[in-house]
Amino acid sequence: MLFRNSIPIYHNKFDNLSPLIKLTTEVMMIKREMKLTLKELAKYFPIVTITGPRQSGKTTLARAVFPKYNYVNLEDPDTREFALTDPRRFLSQFRDKTILDEVQHTPELFSYIQTIVDEKNKSGMFILTGSNQFSYMKSISQSLAGRTGILKLLPFSYFELYQNKVIPLEQVLFSGFYPRIFDKKIPPDFFMSGYLDTYIQKDIRNISNLQYMNVFLKFMQLCAGRTGQIINFNSIGNALGIDHKTVKKWISILEASYIIF
């Protein structure tokens, strides 16, 4: 079991990481290996769906690859309300070459988008991005199957960040690979704390009817402490006072949201 960036556990022993962060932020836009793949998918499909964990760089990649596309952020409350209230009129503004960001907020649009792409039969019409992997991909598979290419974008790879440089392993593990850490020079422990709060408040509450969020947080901490070990569902369950079936369910939630691998 690999726990990405060991999110719930923080230490101060690597506080001298600022030189590392400065090293990797000399170039404002780090080239993503998925850039060419995204371009290729847009040649063959009317829609390209970019999925992946929060803050993995989906919006940045989409806007960098397609700078001339219309850009619509559905995180904005007014924009989202318009899209939900009158989806047909909303989409009439952007019937071609449009990036719809955070589209998991408006799954009602998918049927209308399906109608548009079927009528026009053109490639590269819409680029969709979304962070809530669960409801997002379920809606995509129901409405846009066969019409969308799917690109899974994870945070930076080692090669994207460091090329052929040799970086001490402890520094790499502590700093992680999320783009915002390097773009904004955020201390990794600050970033991970905020990321965890967002993950639990937005994603976990939406996908699972968890009654005891504090127990789930302790569960994540136990998983982080077992990084690289053979997983023992009973051991984790006993430590938390829950059964092994619940542990398996929670593990599957973390896997589906790219927190563990």
Image (tube, rainbow, N blue to C red):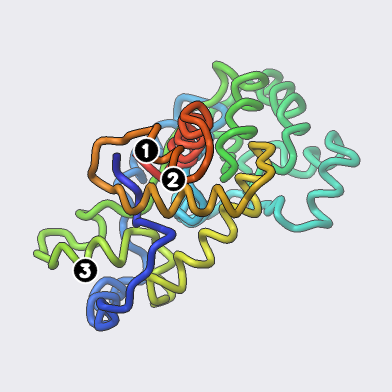
Whether residue 36 is situated above or below residue 185 in the rendered picture:
above
Circle 1: is it few (<14), some (14-19), or many (20+) Cα within 10 Å? few
Marks 3 and 2 sit apart, C-alpha to C-alpha, by 30 Å
Helix or strand or loop: what does disc 1 sit on? helix
Residue at 64%, 52% in the rendered image: 71
Q: Is residue 166 left or right of residue 251?
A: left
Looking at the rendered structure, which numbered label has been put on residue 171?
A: 3
Q: Is residue 42 visible?
A: no
The tag earlier along the polypeptide, 3 or 2, is 3
Looking at the rendered structure, which numbered label has been put on residue 213?
A: none
The tag earlier along the polypeptide, 3 or 1, is 3
Q: Nearer the viewer, residue 8 or 26?
A: 8
Task: Report the mark closest to the observer, 3 or 1.
Answer: 1
Where residue 15 appears, as percent x and y from the top left, is 29, 81
Q: Residue beneath label 1, please?
A: 235
- Amino acid at the residue labelled 1: Ser
Q: Is residue 63 left or right of residue 79?
A: left
Name which quarter of the figure residue 141 lies in: top right
Q: Nearer the viewer, residue 92 or 236?
A: 236
Helix or strand or loop: what does disc 3 sit on? helix
Q: Is residue 119 visible?
A: yes
Q: Residue beneath label 2, please?
A: 239
- Amino acid at the residue labelled 3: Gln
Circle 3: is it few (<14), some (14-19), or many (20+) Cα within 10 Å? some
- Amino acid at the residue labelled 2: Ala
Helix or strand or loop: what does disc 2 sit on? helix
Asked whether the beta carbons under mark 2 and mark 1 sit within 8 Å of each other, the answer is yes
Residue at 41%, 40% in the rendered image: 236
